[in-house]
Amino acid sequence: MNVEVAAKALKELGHPTRLSIFKLLVKSGHQGLPVGSIQENLDIPNSTLSHHIAKLVSVQLVEQQREGRVLTCIPKYEVLNQLIDFLGEECCIAQPE
């Protein structure tokens, strides 16, 4: 992950609503949650929720899968792990031993 990609992901996670959505999805596990469940859990209006989910999808932190009428949001743990690794990869390298 490069600085630009990490900065974009962190920017989107820097919004309280998007961070709440992403945290809820991470808690949900690899199966994700239907949009309706996210809306119920966080009490976010549908149009607002769609906007925030689209932002998370745009930086590849969330993917969406449709089955019939149900749209499920799934956290992309590999991207989350890349972001965490990026933030910690140079931890303490400037400290003398």
Image: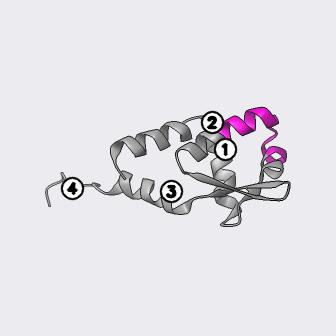
* Residue beneath the point at 56% across and 51% down: 61
* Residue beneath the point at 63% across and 49% down: 22
**Viewer-nearest of labels 2 and 3?**
3
Q: Are marks 3 and 1 in contact (CB under 8 Å)?
A: no
- Which amino acid lies under the numbered mark 1 shown in the image of this protein? Ser
**Viewer-nearest of labels 3 and 1?**
3
Please provide percent x and percent y for residue 70: 83, 55
The alpha-carbon separation of the residues under discs 4 and 1 comes to 32 Å
Q: Quadrant of residue 69?
A: bottom right
| Earlier residue among tags 3 and 4 | 3
The alpha-carbon separation of the residues under discs 4 and 2 comes to 32 Å
Location of the C terminus by quadrant is bottom left
| Earlier residue among tags 4 and 2 | 2
The alpha-carbon separation of the residues under discs 3 and 1 comes to 15 Å
Element at label 4: loop
The alpha-carbon separation of the residues under discs 2 and 1 comes to 6 Å
